Amino acid sequence: MSDVNLEKSEERPDLGATNGAEAPTAGAAGLTFADVAQQGHTATTLDPDAKSVLSVQDLKMYFPVRSSGIIRRTVGHVQAVDGISFQVPKGGSLGLVGESGCGKSTTGRLITRLYTPTGGSMKFGDGEDDIAKMSNRQLKPLRRNVQMIFQDPYTSLNPRHTVGAIVGAPLAVHNVVPKNKILPRVQELLEVVGLNPEHYNRYPNEFSGGQRQRIGIARALTLNPKLLVADEPVSALDVSIQAQVINLLQDIQREFDVAFLFIAHDLAVVRHFCPEVAVMYLGKIVEVADRETIYGHAHHPYTQALLSAVPDVKQAAIGGRRERIRLEGDVPSPINPPSGCRFRTRCSLAQEICAKVEPPLLQIGPRHKVACHFPGELGNHPTAPVTTGLLGVDRQGSPVSGETATTVSTDPGFEKEWFDVKTQKTVSA
Ligand SMILES: Nc1ncnc2c1ncn2[C@@H]1O[C@H](COP(=O)(O)OP(=O)(O)OP(=O)(O)O)[C@@H](O)[C@H]1O
Ligand code: SF4
Ligand SMILES: [Mg+2]
């Protein structure tokens, strides 16, 4: 990258934080991520009236599996993402959580169009054009608006380029500022992310992990994007550094009004950062809701199992413990997923209907959708499936003659009406 002509300085950098105080050493003090983050910032809030910056409907990504040998035939498909719908609110953030291999990164790469989806549609802002079907040339303006922050700060920065060249590269590629304005813009961005602007001529290996992730964030911000896809942006960092980087991302979100699709394993990090959360299992969204509902009133057995593994600070303070739900067995292969509900091979509540009929992602509250035949709070799941009337099937999942199945909408976002689990009737706000 030669567009930014920056001379390498001989001086060694100060590898400590260059701006702002270091966060406390959480691990040593026995604090959780949430404690540390709370010392810096309060959790982000939900704006229920915000328009969507990204709308995704029925998105699919099937990777072909080829046989070995000279003639390589397609022998199957990895159903990495299989018909997911969601919205990211303007200036807000949606968390995407789930076990390893459930399709989170593939979703992020589809949105940034690093992959071309097998099916489904994606709309950006008020635009009517389907970005899932755009050519590379048509995508160029979109790439300015949607940027990605990667998980690994050690491999996502080119070690042979200076920080100035890395952060300034998008400006040069998109030709948005004159060449003599690139360096001032780079320095401004380094300052925004808490790095010394004079360190623009240093190389990535001269920075710590947290500082490198700040460089990655500066690079993602260069073109003033409207949406940032952050794929596990802090999971490679120490817990005290995690809190600093999350607090920085929150500042950036407020300052630049940028929306986030925040991909993470760590439910404590997501709770702090995301007012809305979608839970994925084996290529599907199984539950999506606002933060209070997901963390306080989850209705899907998989979400409940994930949450049971998160240390509960309040319970611990009064000497109690949240009961851990152990998931039996491994995640099945996405090449040949289980029939009906994909979670059924590991679900303690599974009944016959679960193997025969796939539960639709049903809206069951003002901002709550769940895909389960027996949705309910932990310990309060109904004994009979709630979806039989809706799907025109009996309790075993066999079609009932004369009954027709209602088509459940796959529209992203939430409607003003929803299915009430207790009465099994449609209710409205
Ligand atoms: N390029 C590819 N070709 C074939 N299969 C792929 C490809 N990329 C991902 N997969 C498969 O798709 C599934 C979803 O992968 P993905 O990386 O999206 O999961 P993830 O939820 O991000 O997992 P992790 O938490 O480990 O990062 C996995 O089974 C993975 O092996
Ligand atoms: S549909 Fe059945 S198997 Fe799937 S999560 Fe609900 S109870 Fe478990
Ligand atoms: Mg991933």
Image (tube, grey):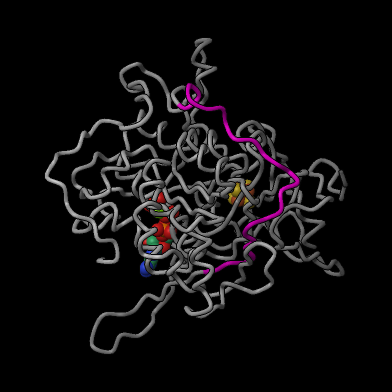
Asked if residue 53 lies in the magenta stretch, the reply is yes
Q: What residue do we see at 73% from left, 49% from top?
A: 385
The quadrant of the rendering that contains the N terminus is: bottom left
Against 297, is 49 above or below?
Answer: below
Q: Which residues are magenta?
A: 37-60
**295, above or below 79, in the image:** above
Q: Which residue appears at 52% of the width and 14% of the height?
A: 320
Q: Is residue 305 visible?
A: no
> Residue 135 in magenta?
no
Q: Residue furthest left?
A: 10
| Residue 365 picture quarter | top right
Q: Residue at x 14, y 39 (%)?
A: 12
Residue 425 or residue 40, whichever sits in front? 40
Query: Which residue is situated farthest in the front direction here?
Result: 180
From the viewer's perspective, tell me whether residue 387 is left or right of residue 152.
Answer: right
Q: Is residue 404 above or below residue 35?
A: below
In percent of width and height, residue 309 lies at 47, 32
Q: Nearer the viewer, residue 408 or 342?
A: 408
Residue 131 visible in rendering: yes
In this view, the residue farthest toward the top is 318
Residue 143 position within the rendered picture, expressed as x and y whole percent measured from the top left:
49, 66
Tell whether 338 sits left or right of 418.
left
Quadrant of the picture in which ligand 1 is shown:
bottom left
Residue 261 % position (x, y): 53, 51
Residue 294 falls left or right of residue 244: right
How many numbered circles does the render carry? 0
Give the x, y percent position of residue 289.
Answer: 66, 44
Q: Please tell me which residue is depicted at 65% across the width and 74% down the height of the picture.
A: 129
